Amino acid sequence: MVPERLPLWLQRYVDKVSDLSLFGGLPANHVLVNQYLPGEGIMPHEDGPLYYPTVSTISLGSHTMLDLYEPRQPKDDDPAEQPRSPPRPATSLLLEPRSLLVLRGTAYTRLLHGIAAARVDALDATSLPPNAAACPSAQPGASLVRGTRVSLTIRRVPRVLRTGLLLGK
């Protein structure tokens, strides 16, 4: 990765997250900004070893449901088959507007995470997310309509290039 200076509005968020000492006492140095339109999602995935094993995400605009999956193991009779995510998440977390989510430890290193492509998240008494007590909108019977969501994924990249690159045409 090649370092670049962040805009001041974004640097404020990075500084606030860095003040939480989530990255072994080192400051965050990477931000990924994603926009999700209503009905859009992202397939279950892992972030990989490039990053410090903690990720923080600030949700702006709309809410979403972040699904966490146990990775499937290859079938014993087919060693060439790659691990794949199961059809149902092990759990889901409600990410409300202006919320901060931190994934670390097993939640970061072992579980896959993704967002289902949906326009509405229907909650009932049997499907409330485990973080419902901390989420005012997580009420039984609620139908949460997704709007446009912007996520700021703030993390630490242990290795960045210290020299600038000359890019030719």
Image (cartoon, rainbow, N blue to C red):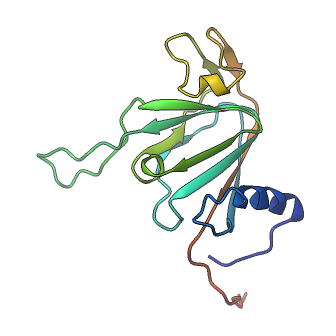
Residue at the extreme left of the image, as rendered: 77
Picture quarter containing residue 140?
Answer: top right
Image coordinates for residue 78, horizontal then vertical, percent: 15, 49
Q: What residue is shown at x 70% (from left), y 77% (from top)? A: 3
Asked whether, in this view, residue 16 is left or right of residue 92, the answer is right
Q: Is residue 106 left or right of residue 10?
A: left
- Is residue 18 placed above or below 60 in the rendered structure? below
Q: Is residue 74 left or right of residue 28?
A: left
Is 66 located above or below residue 82 in the figure? above
Q: Nearer the viewer, residue 99 or 46?
A: 99
Which residue is at the front of the view, 100 or 147? 100
What is the number of callouts on the image? 0
Q: Quadrant of the C terminus?
A: bottom right
- The x and y percentages for residue 9 are 88, 58
> What residue lies at 61% left-to-right and 58% top-to-bottom?
22
Residue 41 picture quarter: top right
Measuring from the top left, give residue 62's x and y in whole percent: 75, 33
73 to 96, vertically: above or below: below
Is 141 rendered above or below residue 14? above
Instruction: List x then y, in percent, for residue 76.
Output: 13, 46
Which of the image's four quarters has the N terminus? bottom right
| Quarter where residue 94 is shown | top right
